[in-house]
Image (cartoon, grey):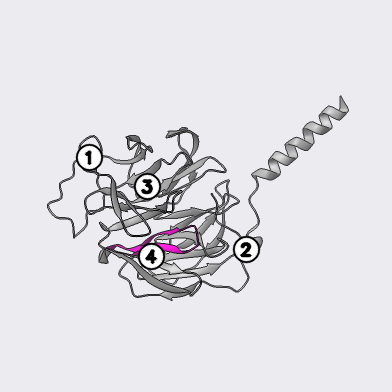
Amino acid sequence: MKKILKTGWVGLVLVLLSCQSVNSSKMFYDGVKPEKVSDKFSFTEGPASDKNGNVYFTDQPNDKIYYWDWKTNKIVEFLDKTGRANGTYFDKEDNLITCSDDQGEIWKISKDKKVEVLSKGFEGKRLNGPNDLWIDAFGGIYFTDPLYERDYWVNFKQEISQKNLYYRNKEGKISKLETFTQPNGIIGSEKFKKLYVSDIDAGKTYVYDILGEGKLSAKKLFCEMGSDGMTLDKFGNLYLTGNGVSVFNREGKKIYQIPIPEKWTSNVTFGGENGNVLFITASESVYVLPTKVKGGK
């Protein structure tokens, strides 16, 4: 009986330890600040790392996609005329999937720049303007669809009154999952089976358990902070943006702040050769910050 109890306590301790996030001193280097790589843009967004660690990002007002080449620390133009791409994410085949809000569409862009429109609307109606997305282990796409009316939209008429979170399965069927005040940043974890969604105008970020293909638990409040974009590290710490980058552990406690000398920090992801460089998009500029941790899956 004592042996069983002892084994049980050991198991419980191990479970508790596995739930703890790594200390921030083991995540960031003392005295190392974000390095500005370039400031030649109008508004940067949507960073996503490809299989080689290069980070692609958008300059939405100028309708361009660029990438950061980690080997040279240079910025290279990838594509002009992107459907006004905003948020992006790479699929398993290393195609860049984009929220291209000019016509309320989701695009797939291959490395040789071939474009396929994956989605044009929902139930025959134009989406408001897909903003950010994450691709799950099934090849499905979770994406947010707020409404930010753009100056470049021509003859726009809102056809969907709600601002929703959607799921597009790998066959192309789209389902509405949840309505928010203004859904924005989104990221998920295959490892921890979690999905995080920011309701930016409500000043909140929520978390769901991923229960299956396009199936989520009821949402739970994760923290009292909205976010434009977000990413996760391998320990499950969540990085939110707005006023610099705010880092929260898995319990929703803020553990670190990364100041960025810009009016607005829009998004963040991990990239680089070893996946341990934070790439940060902020207003007209992009930054890199080497860390001690890697991005999560």
* Dominant secondary structure (helix, strand or loop) of the stretch shown in magenta: strand
Residues packed near mark 1 inside 10 Å, few (<14), some (14 to 19) or many (20 plus): some
**Residue 265 picture location, percent across and down:** 41, 63
Pick the front one: 183 or 286: 286
Residues packed near mark 3 inside 10 Å, few (<14), some (14 to 19) or many (20 plus): some
Residues packed near mark 2 inside 10 Å, few (<14), some (14 to 19) or many (20 plus): few
Residues packed near mark 4 inside 10 Å, few (<14), some (14 to 19) or many (20 plus): some
Q: Residue at x 45, y 65 (%)?
A: 280
**Residue 282 picture location, percent across and down:** 40, 66
Instruction: Tell me the kind of residue under disc 1.
Output: Ile
Q: Is residue 57 left or right of residue 162?
A: right
**Disc 4 marks which residue?**
264
Q: Secondary structure at mark 1?
A: loop
Q: Residue at x 32, y 44 (%)?
A: 181
Distance from disc 2 to disc 3, alpha carbons, whole Å, reads: 33 Å
**Residue 291 picture location, percent across and down:** 59, 65
Asked if labels 4 and 1 touch by Cβ distance under 8 angstroms, the answer is no
Magenta region: 44-60
**Disc 1 marks which residue?**
160
**Disc 2 marks which residue?**
292
Q: Nearer the viewer, mark 4 or mark 3?
A: 4
**Residue 121 picture location, percent across and down:** 24, 41
Distance from disc 3 to disc 1, alpha carbons, whole Å, reads: 20 Å
Q: Compared with residue 219, is residue 295 higher up or lower down, i.e. above or below?
A: below
**Disc 3 marks which residue?**
202
Instruction: Tell me the kind of residue under disc 3.
Output: Ala
Q: Secondary structure at mark 2?
A: loop
Earlier residue among tags 4 and 3: 3
Q: Nearer the viewer, mark 2 or mark 4?
A: 2
Q: Is residue 54 visible?
A: yes
Distance from disc 4 to disc 3, alpha carbons, whole Å, reads: 18 Å
